Image: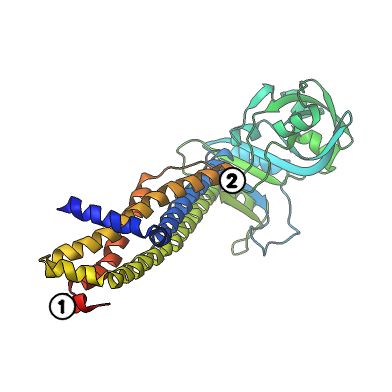
Amino acid sequence: MFYETLKLAIQAIRRNALRSFLTLLGIVIGVGAVIAMVTIGNGTTAKVASDMARLGSNLLFVRPGQFGPGRSAEVKPFNTRDIAALRSQLRRVKAVAPVSQKSATVVYGSESRNVSVMGTDNAYFTTQDWGLKKGRRFLDGELRSGRAACIIGQTVKKELFASMPAIGRRIRVDKVSCEVIGLLIAKGESSFGRDQDDIIIMPLRTYHRRIAGNTDVGRIYVSAIKDVDTGKIQADIERLLRERRDIVVGKKDDFSVADMKQIASAKTATTTILTILLGAVAGVSLLVGGIGIMNIMLVSVTERTREIGIRLAIGAQESQVLMQFLVEAIVLSVIGGIIGVLLGLGLAGAASVGMKIPFIFDPNIIVIAFGFSVLVGIVFGYFPARRAARMNPIEALRHE
């Protein structure tokens, strides 16, 4: 019995192929949009989490001034004595890395480019979980003496040296002739769109003497030992810096300490909320598609009034007529759901390639979107089907 009903439903759909296609288009767009939006959102969230993880594990970021638009431009910078104090007094930390940074012109042969130049020491590589592909880190003598040695990123190597080896060659950083002693492992773009490999790192003392012309430290990275409460270390940093910078009780700090875990959680929470909102907005298309199904089924009931009257007159039950039209609506929504799933996955795949984000396949959202499309077909198909089933056979036969 159900097979015959299904067969009749498919015949009715094929009889009005164009109208049926336009009807299920709303379901296709709705399901495809939900799956594409949620999949792209999940990929974006995963990329943000991955980028934040690449910044370092259990990392705290210390900088002069306060974060946000209201911060003062004139703030007291850190210095090397602050670094020594943090290293000697903080407990359960892996490394404390000073960082000063500015843009400078780098020249090798006929090639030149503007690059971010950073002054730091070997602790920086520990805090950032950043290793070398070739070469070596700075020697203690190079750090103490301020020798002009540098470690370059992959982008700098590609732009200045192309396929030639870079280790052992000398480049000019601003006005300083610097020997390349190491090549960093590629990190790619950060979540803020910055190329992390377009960088040159040199000893902090060299940077201070020959690039910056001062002894300021722009920011400090503190890496905690695994499974240590970074909140406790953050409180210790704030207490120590308040003492060193003579900040009395009740006065606002003139520095900021940020926990990368908190920043990462906030960013991933934001992208998750945006994903849910985009999915909800796309889900409205499914309701529009359901209204389209109800509209076309009402038209179909009106057009087939005499057919319905004949079926009722020769003994068909109301439940059979209701089932016939309900199955037609469900078949339309199922076909639309299948096409929508394929369309959504295709769009998400194309977006993941174009946006360079991971493709996160989530079977749950596919089941939910497809199930909702079927539910839409049942709900919006029921009312026209009930109207057909409750027709008066005599009135239906008189219909022109």
Is 88 on the left-hand or right-hand side of 384? right
Above or below residue 362? Residue 110 is above
Is 27 on the left-hand or right-hand side of 128? left
- In the image, 49 versus 315, the foreground residue is 315
Residue 58 percent across, percent down from the top left: 52, 40
Say few, some or many: other residues with alpha carbon within 10 Å of mark 1 (under 14 / 14 to 19 / 20 or more).
Answer: few
Q: Residue most toward the left?
A: 315
- In the image, 320 versus 350, the foreground residue is 320
Above or below residue 136? Residue 236 is below
**Secondary structure type for disc 1:** helix
Q: CA distance from mark 1 to mark 2?
A: 62 Å
Mark 2: which amino acid? Answer: Met
Above or below residue 52? Residue 323 is below
- Quadrant of the rendered structure where residue 133 is? top right
Residue 121 percent across, percent down from the top left: 70, 33
**Could you say which disc has been placed on residue 320 in the image?**
none
Mark 1: which amino acid? Answer: Ile
- CB contact under 8 Å: marks 1 and 2: no
- In the image, 84 versus 139, the foreground residue is 139
Name the residue carrying label 2: 355
Name the residue carrying label 1: 394
* Nearer-N-terminus badge (1/2): 2
